[in-house]
Image (tube, grey):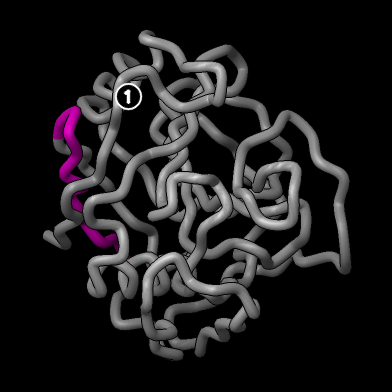
Amino acid sequence: MLIRPALAALLLLPALASCGADGTEEPKSDAEACTYTKDGQEPARDVKLPPGTPDHSGKVAVTMKTTVGDLHLSLDAKNKPCTVNSFLSLVKQDYYDKTGCHRIGHDAPYLFLQCGDPTFSGYGGPGYTIPDELTGDETYAAGTLAMARTQSPNSGGSQFFMVYGNSTWPPDYATFGTFDSSSIRILQGVGAKGSDGNEHPNEKVDITDIVVR
């Protein structure tokens, strides 16, 4: 899941040219501190940096309330603590509330819905980046939740994508959770309605609230 063909628009492409140093990292344990780096960009919404020490461990159950139905997520704070920590920090600050999911892929093998940009442009972010928590063994089966990023390593921020059909990207996008079969069916219904000429889903999908259960 990557960013658009400019400096900062996260999107999902079949292949990307890599830029910068190798950002692959081994997953961190729950106890390790997280480092978040300000990116010099104006944040899409005014938010604070996430805490340096994750507040959660293990699995974190989350309900994402949307205009097409509730999506039930399970976040993997054990293996992706810094990614989950950032996501939950943004949730706590209502960053995702009343935002639209701006990009959909509805042709195999790239079946996904991309969300997390309050500007709906594909270029918006929280004003900081997070480290790529990658193992090199990432796969993107239906029900996978993963971070979007640019062609550069360690460039993820707030944008994420939800895979509703088995997809075949390279292992460059940090997975940090899953969603259940009922949620997959909801997103498959959105995907079946296709997209407009700008990759926006024909069926509007807005996030109204995200609740940690």
Residue at x 60% of width, y 38% of height: 139
Q: Amino acid at mark 1?
A: Leu
Left or right, 174 with respect to 204, comes to right
Q: Position of residue 6 (x, y in %)?
A: 74, 49
Residue at x 65% of width, y 47% of height: 3
Task: Check residue 60 for magenta coloring.
Answer: yes
Q: Which residue is mark 1?
A: 187
Q: Is residue 47 above or below residue 157?
A: below
Left or right, 179 with respect to 116, comes to left
Residue at x 29% of width, y 14% of height: 189
Task: Check residue 63 for magenta coloring.
Answer: yes
Instruction: Please state the total of marks drawn on the protein image.
Output: 1
Q: Position of residue 8 (x, y in %)?
A: 66, 56
Magenta residues, as a range?
A: 58-69
Helix, strand or loop at label 1? It is helix
Residue at x 60% of width, y 73% of height: 41
The secondary structure making up most of the magenta span is strand
Tag 1: Cα neighbours inside 10 Å, few (<14), some, or many (≥20)? many
Outermost residue to the left: 213
| Front one among 111 and 81 | 111
